[in-house]
Image (cartoon, rainbow, N blue to C red):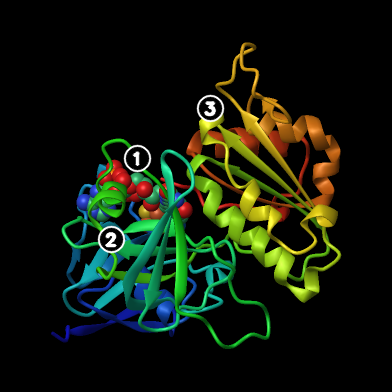
């Protein structure tokens, strides 16, 4: 059934965009090329806040943690959770860095197959009805039947390169089963090959910078494997990046969680250009299987391995919030310029 579409005017500017009643302000703005600031797209980070000046809107998730009671009292909303019910005027400070390289596409997708990676991490392959162009490192939203709200998952396959115009229809995600989690349980336990979901993407700012001439450091923790594998695949497939070296660190809690190396070893010239280091935080002195692995945390391991050489690297990371915070502190302490550091926080 077709949905009513409304005009959203950005106060104090000549910018406006159309938003359907079943879309969100953030996603519709990005589809129109408007640089609406955001990060998670799932109501948690609060980066997509705006102020409603005129009109009436609805919220997909009124209790979303990204909005405080004070925000609500001040007529603020989250772009990623707000739907129009009529024309709106909103106050928003756009920022060029959020201008989408590829406007997000909303398409149905068929679940093809899954593949086990570790005891709690699997890869899920979908075929989208419409091509979905993305850059390596970006994520998409999956809306599953019977699950309230979409879930954000990063693509693990290689994205588009500069100059490429033809996007593919196959899309892969690597998802960790979260204890008690509704969306991940649905993927692991209920989705059967042939089932149809809605996929909306691409989103995210932590994509591969092809034109930067620095060596690359990828740091993945836990469920952050997918975007880092996509970045590595992109770096080893892009003709513009042929001279670049790549170091890949994987932070795991236990030995059974370590993964990723088999995927990297299939990349052309991995032996010459790539190195892989697993870092296990829960390992004890008694663990005898730690051959080649480091004990401890990924942020300490990269600081000890590279020290101030991190200042000359292009750094991408993904994983749990705690890892991200520790890593950022380490990089700031080592005076790494922040425009060389790329991440989308997982929530
Ligand atoms: C940018 C980004 C990229 C990510 N990439 C990956 C990845 O590659 N692999 C991976 O395993 N995980 C990834 N995640 C985490 C993933 O999106 C889920 O949070 C995780 O799988 C847990 O989901 P769940 O449904 O199992 O748990 P639940 O606890 O059921 O749900 C948690 C998530 O759902 C949202 N949510 C909960 N209730 C509602 C509601 N009523 N309406 C709307 N939203 C709701 C929350 O914001 C939260 O994101 C990513 C997260 C982000 C933000
Ligand atoms: S809360 Fe909307 S982008 Fe994070």
**Mark 1 within 8 Å of ligand 1, using the beta carbon:** yes
Q: Position of residue 119 (x, y in %)?
A: 43, 38
The mark nearer the N terminus, 3 or 1, is 1
Front label number (2 vs 3): 3
Question: Which quadrant is the N terminus positioned in?
Answer: bottom left
Question: Splitting the image into 4 quarters, where does residue 8 fall?
Answer: bottom left
Residue plotted at (57% across, 37% down): 258
Q: Which residue is mark 2?
A: 81
**Mark 3 within 8 Å of ligand 1, using the beta carbon:** no
Q: Looking at the image, is 327 positioned above or below residue 109?
A: above
Evaluate if marks 2 and 3 touch, with contact meaning CB atoms under 8 Å apart.
no
Q: Position of residue 136 (x, y in %)?
A: 59, 66
Evaluate if marks 2 and 1 touch, with contact meaning CB atoms under 8 Å apart.
no
The mark nearer the N terminus, 2 or 3, is 2
Q: Which residue is mark 3?
A: 254
Disc 2 crowd, CA 10 A, few/some/many (<14, 14-19, 20+): many
Q: Does any portion of residue 177 appear in the rendered image?
A: yes
Disc 1 crowd, CA 10 A, few/some/many (<14, 14-19, 20+): few
Question: Which quadrant is the C terminus positioned in?
Answer: top left
- Mark 3 to mark 1 CA distance (whole Å): 16 Å
């Amino acid at each position: 059934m077709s949905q009513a579409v409304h005009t959203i005017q950005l106060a104090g500017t000549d910018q406006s965009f159309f938003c359907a009643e079943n879309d969100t302000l953030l996603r519709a703005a990005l589809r129109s090329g408007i640089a609406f600031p955001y990060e998670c797209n799932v109501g948690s980070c609060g980066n997509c806040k705006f102020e409603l000046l005129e009109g009436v809107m609805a919220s997909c998730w009124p209790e979303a943690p990204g909005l405080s009671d004070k925000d609500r009292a001040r007529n603020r909303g989250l772009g990623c959770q707000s739907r129009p019910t009529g024309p709106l005027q909103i106050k928003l400070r756009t920022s060029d860095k959020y201008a989408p390289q590829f406007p997000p596409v909303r398409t149905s997708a068929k679940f093809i197959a899954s593949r086990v990676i570790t005891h709690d991490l699997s890869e899920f392959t979908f075929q989208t009805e419409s091509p979905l162009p993305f850059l390596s490192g970006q994520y998409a939203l999956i809306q599953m039947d019977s699950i309230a709200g979409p879930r954000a998952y990063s693509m693990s396959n290689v994205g588009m390169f500069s100059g490429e115009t033809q996007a593919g229809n196959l899309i892969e995600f690597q998802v960790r089963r979260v204890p008690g989690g509704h969306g991940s349980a649905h993927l692991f336990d209920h989705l059967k090959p042939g089932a149809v979901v809605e996929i909306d993407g691409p989103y995210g700012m932590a994509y591969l910078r092809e034109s930067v001439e620095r060596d690359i450091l990828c740091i993945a923790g836990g469920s952050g494997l997918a975007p880092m594998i996509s970045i590595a695949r992109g770096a080893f497939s892009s003709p513009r990046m042929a001279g670049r070296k790549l170091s890949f660190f994987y932070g795991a809690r236990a030995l059974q969680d370590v993964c990723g190396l088999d995927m990297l070893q299939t990349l052309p010239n991995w032996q010459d250009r790539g190195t892989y280091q697993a870092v296990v935080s829960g390992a004890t002195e008694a663990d005898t299987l730690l051959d080649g692995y480091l004990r401890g945390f990924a942020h300490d391991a990269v600081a000890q391995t590279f020290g101030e050489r991190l200042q000359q690297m292009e750094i991408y990371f993904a994983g749990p919030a705690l890892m991200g915070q520790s890593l950022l502190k380490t990089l700031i302490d080592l005076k790494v310029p922040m425009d060389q550091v790329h991440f989308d926080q997982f929530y």
